[in-house]
Image (tube, rainbow, N blue to C red):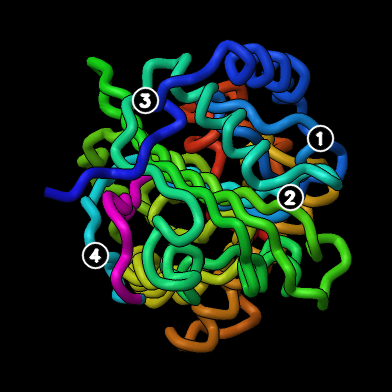
Amino acid sequence: MKTQPASPMNRPMTAFTILATAAVAILLFCGAALAADVPGSKDNPLLKRYEGSEIIGYDYRGFDKFHLITGPLKNYERPPDPSSTVTGKHTRILYVAPLDRSPLEVFHNYAQELEQNGYATVFTCSETECGKDKAIARTLYSSDKKLSNKGQMSEYAFTSPVEPQFLAATLTRPEGDVHVSLLVARETFKHFKETSQRTLVLLDIVEAAPMEKKMVTVDAGAMAKSIEAQGTIALYGIYFDTDKAELKPESAPTLEEIAKLLQGDAALKLYVVGHTDGVGGFDYNMDLSKKRAQAVVRELTGKYGVAEGRLKSAGIGFLAPVGSNEDEDGRAKNRRVELVKDIN
């Protein structure tokens, strides 16, 4: 019968180790964000960062699927084998730790923090215990899962990882379980001085919750009524990934209805206005909202045949909120595209 490698959460600790680890944890965990963090990123409130770390990659999805690794990997298969599939709100954060911090030191701080917060270890491993050479890093940070917030510096993280440490843990709670995947390793890829010979941390947090069952596609008739009565309509069926301005395929039904709206009223002209939530700086969000509005106009004119003169794009960032930017429900309401009637 195979036994799992001893976990920092369940292996016996000497008095010296306990004191040393506690001292390091007190010194190194503060959770404060750095000015150098990529725009729009932040720590997940469920788990603090290692002090002095910088966010170089970030992605948040309101509902996503994630494969939580549950044992040593034998190969590079996707989904990884063995693993369990979990769904819910998914936060992925890529940190670079301060200079001269080893993967083991950073890893033990996270492991202790998780243990103190009541998480149970699902699987943990160190170096060769994790399976085939580099399989765990390449599987977790595969081509379809990479972050690009800082261009190639983010994309090429974990290119040549050494000293890998991994932990999968779960917190059981009434409002939904929380699943954590933690990969820590030292990067030896020399192309980027910001990450070369530095400890990298890849943190995935999935907060299990059912997908919201609500229709967000508004048909052309409803759009016409709202624009006639109020001069505008807010649409939530146009989707973008975090920090991106490329339309996702799920946007097609709403775009089709906008095209029908314009086909049904040859005199109608519209402003397409992008809105963001309040995460990130003013200039960043103004630029992002503008690019998203432009993407909608390009799609409607290029794919759906709408005349260019009937649409104008604009972005106003977070300057016209309809909900509080202090919580996720409010931020979700603020991320939208509005159609505004052009009366000129």
Residue appearing at x 32%, y 75% in the figure: 75
Q: Write down the residue under mark 3.
A: 10
Q: Is 181 left, or right, of 290 in this rendering? A: left
Q: Which residues are magenta?
A: 62-75
| Element type at mark 1 | loop
Q: Residues within 10 Å of mark 4 (few under 14, many from 20)?
A: some
Residue 344 position (above or below residue 324): below
Q: Earlier in the sequence, mark 2 or mark 1?
A: 1
Q: Write down the residue under mark 2.
A: 96
Q: Earlier in the sequence, mark 1 or mark 4?
A: 1
Q: CA distance from mark 4 to mark 2?
A: 27 Å
Q: Does 178 appear in magenta?
A: no
Do we see residue 232 in this rendering?
no
Q: CA distance from mark 1 to mark 4?
A: 34 Å
Q: Earlier in the sequence, mark 4 or mark 2?
A: 4
**Mark 4 belongs to which amino acid?**
Asp
| Element type at mark 3 | loop
Q: CA distance from mark 2 to mark 1?
A: 9 Å
Q: Write down the residue under mark 4.
A: 81
**Mark 1 belongs to which amino acid?**
Gly
Q: Earlier in the sequence, mark 3 or mark 4?
A: 3
In this view of the protein, which residue sits in the foreground, 267 or 286? 286
